[in-house]
Amino acid sequence: MASGLHVPDWLADQMTRKQYVEKREGFSHVERALKELDPKLSLVYVGLRVPHDKCPIGALPGRFHVRRDNHEAGVPDTFMPIVNQHGEYTDPDMGIVENLKKHDLWKKNVAQELSRRWEKEEKARQKKELAFKEDFKQEFAQRVKSKLNPSIAFNTDLSWKAKKGKA
């Protein structure tokens, strides 16, 4: 596999071509799974010292990426950086492939499920926002009342002795 591999110049930085090929071959199972999912997908590494003007759009230096070859469509390749939930470096694993399968919008049931999930999240967000607004209104009304009628509010749930600390 390594003999026919062409490593573009913009990929070669502190990593030698041999190191890149060895590291990439360690993730060959991920590469095969990506190719099974879509033949235009590949696994690439964008080096840390890639000049800003030569870094592909959407790519992060020092990270592995899933690259989709879009040359047939006449547009630049698409790069999806492989990072953890905090945006930090992580090695490629099969979780990347599973995530792509889970979000494959070409499949009808996936798009419907994502749409349902987004609607559910939007309803929950709206409900939370409505509860916040209602709490704000109540607090505002209490503050206005306390300014207009500065009296002492006693807690009627406790007996007088309990309030004094004798109960």
Image: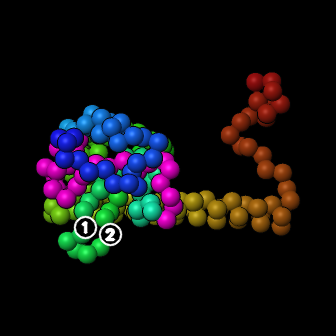
Identify the image quadrant of residue 123: bottom left
Apparent side of residue 70 relative to residue 127 in the rendered image (left or right)? left
Q: In which quarter of the image is the C terminus?
A: top right
| Picture disc at residue 6 | none
Label 1, on which residue? 70
Q: Classify mark 1: residues with Cα within 10 Å, few (<14), some (14-19) or many (20+).
A: few
Q: Quadrant of the N terminus?
A: top left
Amino acid at pointer 2? Pro
- Magenta residue check for 139: no
Residue at the image position 45 percent from the left and 62 percent from the top: 54
Residue 93 visible in the displayed image: no
Q: Residue furthest left?
A: 36
Q: Mark 2 points at which residue?
A: 76
- Residues at discs 2 and 1 in contact (Cβ within 8 Å): yes
Choose the circle earlier in sequence order: 2 or 1.
Answer: 1
Secondary structure beneath label 2: loop
Q: In the image, is 10 to the left or to the right of 48?
A: left
Residue found 22% across the figure and 74% down from its top: 73
Q: Residue furthest bottom?
A: 74
